[in-house]
Image (cartoon, helix red, strand yellow):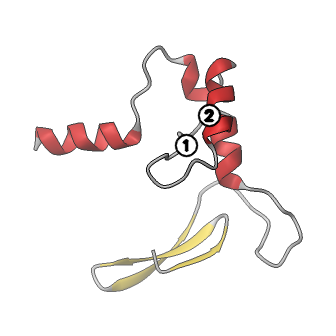
Amino acid sequence: MIKVYDGDTITLLHNNQNLKIRLYGIDTPKSNQSYDIDVNAEQVKNGYAWAYRKYSNAYTHLEIKARAEKRGLWKQNNPVKPSEFRKNQKEKT
């Protein structure tokens, strides 16, 4: 990732080319708009992401609450962490 413009537009480097990516179907506040929200916290709080404890414990309390309330992915019996999913995919190849 080369640049994050705001919550819906980023630039990636792919095959030595800059690709500007606009996320489909959403329009987020621009970086100079005064709208403070922690998107990472919102994802964990609503059960759409794990707290990535390898790098931080900042969102652990939100994951614990989301699990207890069976929000999002925590409705499933055994959701698979993305890190485990990637590891399993790598082992298959």
Amino acid on which the number 2 mark rests in the picture: Glu
Residue 63's tag is 2
In the picture, residue 18 is in which quadrant?
Answer: bottom left
Task: Give residue 37's position: percent from left, percent from top.
Answer: 79, 57
Could you tell me which residue is drawn at 65 percent across and 24 percent down? 71
Of residue 11 and residue 1, the one placed in the foreground of this image is 1
The crowding category of the residue bearing disc 1, from other C-alpha atoms within 10 Å (few below 14, some 14 to 19, many at least 20), is many
> Count of labels shown?
2
Q: Is residue 83 above or below residue 35?
A: above
Q: Are marks 2 and 1 in contact (CB under 8 Å)?
A: yes
Residue that badge 1 annotates: 51
Residue at 77% x, 72% y is: 30
Quadrant holding the N terminus: bottom left
Residue lying farthest to the top in this orientation: 77
Asked which secondary structure carries label 2, the reply is: helix
Q: Amino acid at mark 1?
A: Ala
Outermost residue, left direction? 93
Give the Cα separation between the discs numbered 2 and 1.
6 Å
> Where, quadrant-wise, is the C terminus in this rendering?
top left
**Residue at the front extreme, as displayed:** 57
Residue located at (43% from left, 50% from top) = 54
Name above or below for residue 9 compared with residue 91.
Answer: below
Q: Which mark is residue 16?
A: none
- Is residue 82 at least partly visible in the picture? yes
- For the point 76% across and 75% down, which residue is it? 31
Q: Classify 10 Å Cα crowding around label 2: few (below 14), some (14-19), many (20 and above).
A: many
N-term mark: 2 or 1: 1
Give coordinates of residue 75: x percent, y percent.
Answer: 57, 18
In which quarter of the view is residue 28 placed?
bottom right
- Residue 91 x, y percent position in the rendering: 13, 40
Horizontally, residue 67 falls left or right of residue 92, namely right
